Amino acid sequence: MKYFIEYASYNSKLRNFDTAGKLLLSISMLFCGICGNNIFSLIFILCTAIYFTVFKSGTDLIKYIKMYISPAIFIILGVITISLNIYTERTGIISLPFFANKFICITENSIKLGVITAIKAFSCISSMYFIILTTDIYKITGVLQKLKIPYLIIELMFIIYHFIFVLSERRDCIILSQKSRLGYNGFMQSINSFAKAFSSVFILSFIRVSKIYNSLEARCFDGNFKFSKTDINKKEFIHSVIISIIIVSIFIFMEVFL
Amino acid sequence: MNIIELKNINFTYGDKTQALKNINITIEECKTTVILGENGAGKSTLFTLLNGIIKPNSGEYRFNGNIVNYSKKELFYLRKNIGIVFQEPDNQIFSSSVYDEIAFGPRNLKIPEYEIDNIVKESAKETDVTEYFEKPVHFLSYGQKKRVSISSILAMKPKVIIFDEPSACLDVVQKDKLYSLYKKLKNKGITIIISTHDIDFAYKIADNAIVLKNGECIFNGKIDDLFANDKIVQKSCLKYPPVYILYNELIKKHIIKNTYCTPKTIEDIITILNNV
Ligand SMILES: Nc1ncnc2c1ncn2[C@@H]1O[C@H](COP(=O)(O)OP(=O)(O)OP(=O)(O)O)[C@@H](O)[C@H]1O
Ligand SMILES: [Mg+2]
């Protein structure tokens, strides 16, 4: 699961498809997801994104679904908070007494709002997953640079991406080394080992970062990362412009008429 | 000509480990120098000092005859001319693709993008990493990473290249390739500095040797002189290269005569034996 994003984008059938095109597609779906207020149109966006990622790009379905688990937890918690409201009288479908004459109520409207918010969140996430799971990170940074996106944002994205790997690699190494020396036998032992691993992940990562910085400096680093610019394939780009227009028009149609 | 000169250099780490003690070293231009010494002798520390990453607490560092004064401009000049392949490739590689990693140095040197493409391909060829261009770097094996890190320095075309244990973890074929790469670089007039624990390899490629022990320099001179000096070899816990032992044994037994060009490899000895 750890390298799933990397494996998926490396094996994706859309890997060599024009990056700017994919980015446009993904951003227009994201935009629709953010603006949409109609359950059907949002489901349409969600399905389209899943269709492109799973069927067109050939991502492993099970692992793809697993990727939704962690955001799903937060979204469900969010939905619950949205659906619950506190009133001074009993209203709505369900109402439970709270303290001091107040009631926790779930109304039809609040449920509807919660569901829409959840689907909205999922459709936005799925359109972002589409670009992540089909494209190598360096190509994305390349296109963003070509599109004159502020340098700071690209750099931030790159650094976050890189250091997620630094941290997770360190963690894996340490846990492996502890396991190989029987560090996870029994409950107390496991807790002890885990705590040690946790603290050393951070210390080691800091040291590693400073060493990496040394190596950057040794190669005349002046504080600005320079990324490869990705070329735009005109034909494929136009192809995806057309697809994006179709998706957006269907979306608008559904928003207005459904 | 001496390209690098260190005079009375001292360096102490933050935890009061004195890693370099009163170092006096000269490194000749266009020659290959090996730095030998036990673990923790201070080899890697010396290298980061040569690249200007750490600043000595006291002493004088001359590059190309000029004193390095650690101004920003000077450091850029220093780093442009001295490339360093670090011991741990993991601490060096950070880009998301092999191509970007190799292009990192040249881009910092402000070389135009159309030239960079050629440079990257050329230097990737030297260490056989062209096939990994598109591969995310986290998937590479240790030896592959090592080779990528070597390429990424070659791409900067420095005058001096420092290799910190380059042959560790390379397979036999790649080690031989590395050996021919050194020869090629040397013919181009590049000064090579290598630290290694592989005494055979060192003996084979080096002209000069520097021996460090506990942060002190105990030898600086021709590698043949080093092995002629029993005391230093013993003091520094070095071993004689088998080729050297064999050659001396053959001379002692009067099987071959003392030639003035000492053989560096088994093949050399075989050639000498064939001529007897
Ligand atoms: N960042 C640091 N902080 C404190 N001490 C350090 C640091 N880095 C190295 N040292 C110490 O400095 C000394 C020299 O270390 P150095 O890494 O230069 O050795 P080395 O000759 O490269 O060894 P090896 O053959 O194992 O690579 C060692 O005693 C080491 O413990
Ligand atoms: Mg070292």
Image: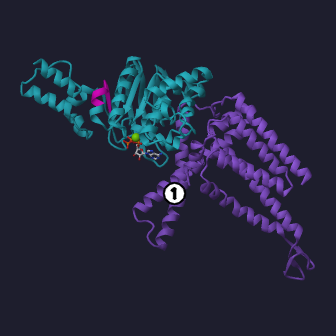
Chain colours: A purple, B cyan
The chain identifier of the residue carrying mark 1 reads A
For this rendering, which residue is in front, B94 or A97? A97
- B44 lies above or below B251: below
Near-viewer residue (A128 or B64): A128
**Quadrant in which ligand 2 is drawn:** top left
Q: Amino acid at mark 1?
A: Ser
**Magenta span:** B202-210
The answer to whether residue B247 is left or right of residue B171 is: left
Q: Quadrant of the C terminus of chain B?
A: top left
Q: Residue at x 78, y 60 (%)?
A: A118
| Residue B5 picture location, percent across and down | 42, 25
> Which residue is painted at 34% across and 36% down in the image?
B196
- Answer with the quarter of the image where residue A107 lies: bottom right
Name above or below for residue B213 compared with residue B243: below
Residue A194 within the segment the image draws in magenta: no
Left or right: B66 as drawn, with respect to A110 = left
- On screen, B5 above or below A244? above
Disc 1 element: helix
Residue, disc 1: A200
| Image x and y of residue B139, in percent | 50, 44
